[in-house]
Amino acid sequence: MKITRQKHAKKHLGFFRNHFGVREPYQILLDGTFCQAALRGRIQLREQLPRYLMGETQLCTTRCVLKELETLGKELYGAKLIAQKCQVRNCRHFKSAVSGSDCLLSMVEEGNPHHYFVATQDQNVSVKVKKSPGIPLMFIIQNTIVLDKPSPRTVAFVKAVESGQLVSVHEKESIKQLKEEQGLVRNPERRRRRRKKKVPSPNPLSCLKKKKKAPDVQSPASEKKRKRKRTRNRSTPKVPSEQQGVEA
């Protein structure tokens, strides 16, 4: 029985890997109902999940799930301890927390870009997950972990992609990467990393006010010398005595 379960899991994993880009480590989002079912069935999730999926796994949850388990009280105290040992993923409900089911559904919106597995025992959540293509669903039946087969909506989506009617999220990402490598599309992250050109600041020495030149204070002795020089220059030239007799 265990071998057949692993064969089915391997088959389903190959489907999600080929068509939706699911890779190791498999990120599994747990809610309170799944943790409670694992506690009742005495399932060691950290040991049994990697064996069942035949690969590395990461157990994840959200703050909304933890807060919901805290409000439910002592009945789910064991489930809360299991959830607290998981990695906490950031959700968009920072200001006001929502129910664990709504939070998990919000984490896999827009094509499940982070490739989360949803692990829940809530039937309403399971139905909504199956309506969105590309989301692996896990649950516990008779104290055993089961990876559900791809939903009809997922299979129909894959067929539409293969026929060329649609483009999957995984193909969009690969096309975008190829365009960025060839330089056809600029990476917006690189634009942000570019530093702005600094405007050169003015020289602080040039901003200083020019000092006014103090007027030259001349001594009276120097003024007299200048006057004497001027009187000598302006005096008429002396006429020799011989020239004076001739003129007479």
Image (cartoon, rainbow, N blue to C red):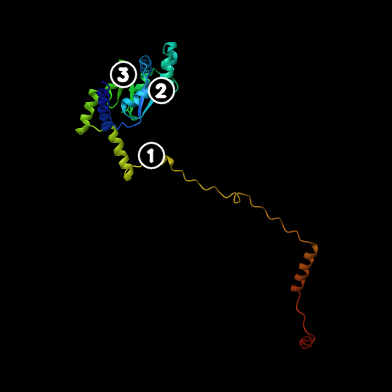
Res. 97 visible in picture = no
* 10 Å crowding of disc 3: few (<14), some (14-19), many (20+): some
Identify the residue at horizontal 77%, vertical 88% (top origin).
246
Q: Position of residue 90 (x, y in %)?
A: 42, 26
- Crowdedness near tag 1: few (<14), some (14–19) or many (≥20) residues, C-alpha within 10 Å: few
Cα distance between the residues tagged 2 and 3:
24 Å
Q: Quick one: label 2 or label 3, which is nearer the N terminus?
A: 2
- Between disc 2 and disc 1, the foreground one is 2
In the rendered view of the protein, which quadrant contains the N terminus?
A: top left
Q: Quadrant of residue 141?
A: top left
Q: Which mark is residue 144?
A: 3
Front residue of 204 and 140: 140
**Relative vertical location of residue 140 with respect to residue 190 in this rendering, above or below:** above
SS label for mark 3 = strand
Q: Which residue is mark 2?
A: 62
**Residue 238 location in percent, x, y?**
77, 80
**Front one among 185 and 156:** 156
Q: Nearer the viewer, mark 2 or mark 3?
A: 3
Instruction: Residue under label 1, please give it.
Output: 188
